[in-house]
Every structure is written in structure tokens, then in C-alpha cells.
Image: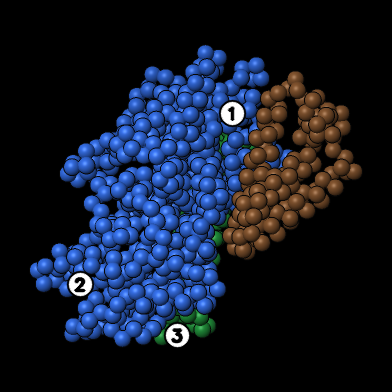
Chain colours: A blue, B brown, C green
Amino acid sequence: MSKALRAALLWPHTWMGVTLGGLLIVIFFMGSLTVFMPEIDRWMMPATRVAMPGAPVSVDAIARPLLEQLTAQRAAGGATVRDWLVEMPDARTPVLQLRVRTSAGGAGMMATADGRRLPPPGTLGASSFFYPLHYCLLLRPGFIGYWIVALAAVAMMAGLVSGVVIHARIFQDFFTFRLRAHPQRSLLDLHNLMGVLALPFHLMITFSGIVIVLPVVFPAGTTLLYAGDMNRFYAEAVGNYDRPAVGAAAPLLPLDPLVDRARRLWAAETGRDVAVAQVGVVHPGDAGAYVRITRLNDDRVTLHNDPLYFDGVTGTLLARGRPGPVVGAQRFIAGLHEVHFDHWTLRWLYFLQGLGGCVLIATGLLYWLEKRRVRHDGRGWRAVAATACATTTGVVLATLAMMVANRLLPAALPSRELAEVAVFFGVWIGTAAHADLHLRRHPDPPWRAHAGLVGGLALVAMAANWITTGDHPIHAWAEGHGAVLGVDGALAVTALVAFFAAWRLEGGRAKARPGGARSGQTLAITPMEAKNG
Amino acid sequence: MADTQQLGVFLLATSGMAMTALGLDRHWLDLVGRRRAVSHRHAFPLRLAAVACWAGALILAITNDGTAIGVILWITALTTGAFAVALSLTLLSLRKPRRRHAAKEVR
Amino acid sequence: MTTPASPPASSRRPRPPRRGGGAPPGGRLHVLARVLAAIVGTYALAWGFGALGAVAGTWLGMAPAEATTLFALLALSAMPGIALWALAAGRVMRVWAVLALGALVQIALAYLVRGAGA
């Protein structure tokens, strides 16, 4: 790598980081939370903290009456039913999720495995808030959020590649972290360490993340070959089957025998017991009805869920969705991103490496801030400093505030889930404003105040869970609520790390300027020790 | 059994990383002695042992989790091991008075 | 980082490295041209490659969805490299010329091949 090339790539690396770093930290943080989406959902939806049924749930006995109930509610005015969907319970989501779509709109609900209908959760939870925030920033109209996230992700890939090129002493410094050096040195060491040691993960996770939404953000072939019709492309790519309703009524077959046939087929092919993920019925009650059954991918990486299509009236196997080798590879890469397979070690390490991505970008920003500080860049510097603060401690604070609101807002509050979202964004905007105001009078973002608040809110969230649900660790242990234990444990660790960071930042203030801190199960960058400087 | 194998993957990956670190002048000087840089006599066996550790970790990971998940686990274990070594080296360097002691242990 | 080298001489006058490493070369307009080339130009070039590859792959007998996905994946893999080249290469005019020409030729060829195949 020539010196000229390194010099030429330095400013793109720097400026991509400064402009998109904050956004990328938010995406990485929300993505890390998404690894434990079902667990956070259990925490935020206490009614779903139920035991996993021992035996497979009967679709006919449990799900079908509820679906017919939902349909009757929705299609009361003579609307036609488009489809039913049942998400079967699994170890991490031990409830049934049911959905009907009619020409008069859709409806959904959750139910326990013994058929008890659960009240609306009153929260979007991780699955409908943190997760969409991760992949589209909640900006769905026109796919605008997908485009922004994909742009940031390509910049992340370019940042990783250019970072490796710029890093002159990549092998000599492979394990180097000089904690007691000058803060700029320590920050750069940590930045390099995070970037180099976790490079395979960061490259994989950014690339595979874009691959999931590739047909949306890169419709080149679809424009020419499918006249831009994405649905037709998807259907052909993964081998979806579809047929229109006939218009004549015909009774729907019992569904359990079809589920058994699907399981037998998969068992014969894979040599193991494969669980069912979804059972869908399209045009139920019509002579053209068909049933779609997909498998759970807890034993393999790919997201390809091997859909089997049965005739809903005669029971014949109509079709089987089988993607070609390239689309199969695409599904595999997508699965690398989403870690749906059952592997707790890897889930935790994905989570930690995702947070490591936050540290990577945050240390880059802090390094830039430290370096630029001397030159008194004024407004631009302050904007970056406030952004860095709002997207690190700020977003952690907003998340924790939402979790506290989730436990403390009254259940009867109308549009309760939106109140939670308002708390999230209110706190987030508040942290940004606070950081900006603070920076007008102080040389540093309010790291210490934020770290203390993070610690306090994490403890409040944990205590609120114990008080409002009675699910304190002993109870959760006895009931086997591993998800609740895990989330509470993560909150406790967050509080410890945040308080430690706040304490160190206070100690360093007298001696020297603090480098900054990042909370959320990661390490705090301790203030410089003046003697080495 | 599966848990022990997984632990083995992480231990082997970390050992390999530790040996790689020893093969680098800076850490060799820090840990073994201030006088000499790592010589060829030491560098080659260290590298060989590191590669052997990583190969063992890969085989163990694949027998435990299958090819696809095994390779992911292996790469993740390498990253984890590298972080563990980097963190240990940082902590060791913080305890300057005890360096002689640490050097003896390594020898 | 440790060795702040002077930025590439895009403006002819030799200028001392004002801000050290990490500062973009040239003035604001220059930076804007670079950034637009890196985002729009890279995307256009990759889009052309994805389109041409999909059409050509189909013409050569691949399933359309397979060819579309294959060349989208390849184009995506190339994007970070192209974007970095657009940001770092010597002259911004040349960057624009290469990107625009490459994109236009590929897109034109893609429509031609599709017309021939249909």
C-alpha cells in the first residue's frame, strides 16, 4: 500500500465517518438489540411470558377458531377474506401470532398455545420498533429509509476498506491498545483494534445487511426484466405459488394433517425433526383455497423457509418454493445477517460485535473531535460533537426511557404504543438539545451526565419490571423466564458500566480533559493519565 | 459435550492468537525480555503452532456445528480470541512493576 | 493519521496542507463534485452493470431472477471500491467521465440486448 494511496483515502474515510457516523451508530445499536428481539419483546409484553407448549400446537383446534373469530369481526360487512396466517410458537416466541387480511383491511392478535386470546400488547416492542428503526429508520413511504440505510451501509463498507488501507501498521499494531497514552493515541488504538479484529464481522454484517434489501435498493435487473415489478421478481426468485380465488364456496380441509405431511416430508429429506414456522391459508372457504406451510430455520443459516403449497380443498401438493442457486446464496447471506439459527454463543457474540461496531464508529468520531479541537472549528465541530453524543449515550437513553415508559404507562392509556414512541423520540431530541446547549458553555459533550442518567434509567427500568410484573430474578428463574432474566441482566450490566464510566469521567476532569465514554455493555474510554502525555 | 467442544474452539483460537502476539516484536519485548527481539528461531515455531491451533479450532467447530455455522463460529472465535489477547496485553502493560514476574511465567 | 500527507494536487497551485490528514482536497465545489460522483456516479455505473449482467445472463440461458440477483450481488461488491476510487482518484473530471460513460454504455447495451432477445 503506497503512501500516496493512504493519503488519498484518508479524507474519504474521515468524511464518511463524520457525516454518516452518527446514523451508522444508531443502525448498529438497533441492530444489536434486534439480535435479542424476541427476548426484548417478552420483556416489553409481559402477557407473552408464557411457557412453551410441550407438544406441537394443533392448528385446527387452537388457531382456526380464533382465525374465524377475527375474520367474522373484520369481514362482517360482506368483505371477502384474502388470507389467514398463523405464526406457530417457538422456544423464543412461545405464543401464536394470528393475522387475517380481508378486502376491508387486516386484523391480528396473539394467543397462547392453549387458545387463550391475549389482549393487545399496547407496545410496538422490539419487533415493531427497534427492528424497523434498524433497517429503515421507520421511514417506509417510498422505501426512503431503506435507501438511506443502504447508502450508509455502502459507506460503512467503503470506510472499512479504506480504513484497512490507511492503517499503516496493521500487523505490528494488531493487538495494541495503549490505554495510558495520550487520549488521541488511545482512541485511535481502540478504533483500529475494533476495526481490524472484528473486520470479518463488520464486513459480513454490512454486506449481508444490504443483500437483504438488495431488490429494493438496487432494482437494475428488475427494471429491465420485470418492468420494475418487484413482487413478480420476488415470486419468481423464491418460487412462490399463487392462484386466484374461484368465487365458489368450498369447505377448507382440516389443516393438521397437511402440517403432518409437511413435517414428514422435511423429516425424510433432512433426517431430523423440523418444526413448522408458519401455516397460511389463501382464499379460505373458496374452491381455489390453498395452504402454505413453511419450516423453522433453527438448524441452518439460510432464510429460505422451504414453503410447501397444498390445495386447500383436495389436499394435493401443488408446488414447492425452490430458489435457484444464486437466489439460494442470497437467502444464505441474508441468514448470516439475521442469526435465526439456534446458537446462543453466536447470538451473544453478534450482539457484542454489533456494539463493537458502535464503539468503532464512536471512537472514530471522538478521535476526529479530539484532533480538531485544537483548531477551534466552531459550529461544525460542535454539531459533530452534539451528534456524537446524541447518537451514543443519547440513543441509549432514549431506548431505556422507552423501556421505562413501557413498564410505567397505564395499560388503559389510549394509543399506548404511540405514547411509548413519543417518549423515545422526546428523550432522544432532549439529549441532542442538551448536548448542544452544554457544548455552548463547556468544551466537552455532557458525557458524565449522560452516563449517570443511563445508569439510573437502566436501574429504574429493571426495578419497574420487577414491581409491575412481579418477575424479579428469583421469580423469573423459577418460572423459566430466561428472556426476562437476560434483559434484566443486560440492564444491570449497562447500569454498572455507565456508573463506572461516570465515576472515571469525574475523576479525570480535574486532571485532564476526558476522552469520552460509551455506555451499553462496552468499555469506557478512560481519561488520559497525564503522566504519560 | 457440545459445550465442551465450543469451549475448545474458543480456547484454541485464543491460544493461536496469543502465540501470534508473541511472534510480534513489541509484545515479545514486553513479555519475554527487553533485550532481544523475537528471533527466527522462535518466530517460526510460534507461527506454526498458531496455525495448528487455528486448524484444530476449525475442525472442532465444524464437527460441532456443521460446516456453515461452524465456519461462522470459528471466525467469531478468532475475533474473540484476538480481543482477549489484546485486553490481556493491555492489562499486563498497566502493571509495570509486575512485568518481571509476568515474564517469568511466560518463560 | 500519524503521517498527514498533503492532499492530491487537484488544484494546480501547491498549497500547504492546511488541516493535515483528513481534509478534502480543493474547494467546496470540488468536494461536492467528488461526493456526487461517489454516490450518484457509483450507483449509476453499478446499476448499468447489474442491468447489463441480468439481461446478458438471461440471454445466455440463466433464469431471469437468478441473473438479476447474481449481477446485483456482484455490483454491490464492487460499489465500495468504485466509490473510494471516485473520491480518491486524481482528477474529478476524469472520474465523472469514466463513471458516466461506463454507466451510459452499459445501460444502452442492456436495452439493446433485451430488445434483441425479445
Q: Viewer-nearest of labels 2 and 3?
A: 2
Above or below, A306 against B73 in this view is below
Q: Nearer the viewer, residue A138 or A313?
A: A313
Above or below, A357 against C111 in this view is above
Query: Badges 2 and 1: C-beta atoms under 8 Å apart?
Result: no
The answer for which chain carries disc 1 is A
Q: Residue A496 got which mark? A: none
2 and 3 marks on the same chain: no
Q: How far from the left and from the top, in percent, is residue C105?
A: 48, 70
Above or below, C40 against C55 in this view is above
Mark 3 — residue?
C117
Q: Viewer-nearest of labels 2 and 1?
A: 2
Q: Residue A81 got which mark? A: 2
Circle 2 residues within 10 Å: few <14, some 14–19, many ≥20: many
CA separation, marks 3 and 1?
A: 60 Å
* Left or right: A1, with A512 as reference point: right
Q: Which element is circle 1 on? A: helix
Q: Residue at x 19, y 65 (%)?
A: A69
Mark 1 — residue?
A184
The answer for which chain carries disc 2 is A
CA separation, marks 2 and 3?
A: 41 Å
- Residue positioned most to the left: A77
Q: How far from the left and from the top, in percent, is residue A437?
A: 34, 24
CA separation, marks 2 and 1?
A: 63 Å
Q: Amino acid at mark 1?
A: Gln
Q: Residue at x 48, y 69 (%)?
A: A274
Q: Amino acid at mark 3?
A: Gly
The answer for which chain carries disc 3 is C
Q: How far from the left and from the top, in percent, is residue C84?
A: 55, 51
Q: How far from the left and from the top, in percent, is residue B86?
A: 67, 37
Q: Nearer the N terminus, badge 2 or badge 1?
A: 2
Q: Residue at x 84, y 34 (%)?
A: B107
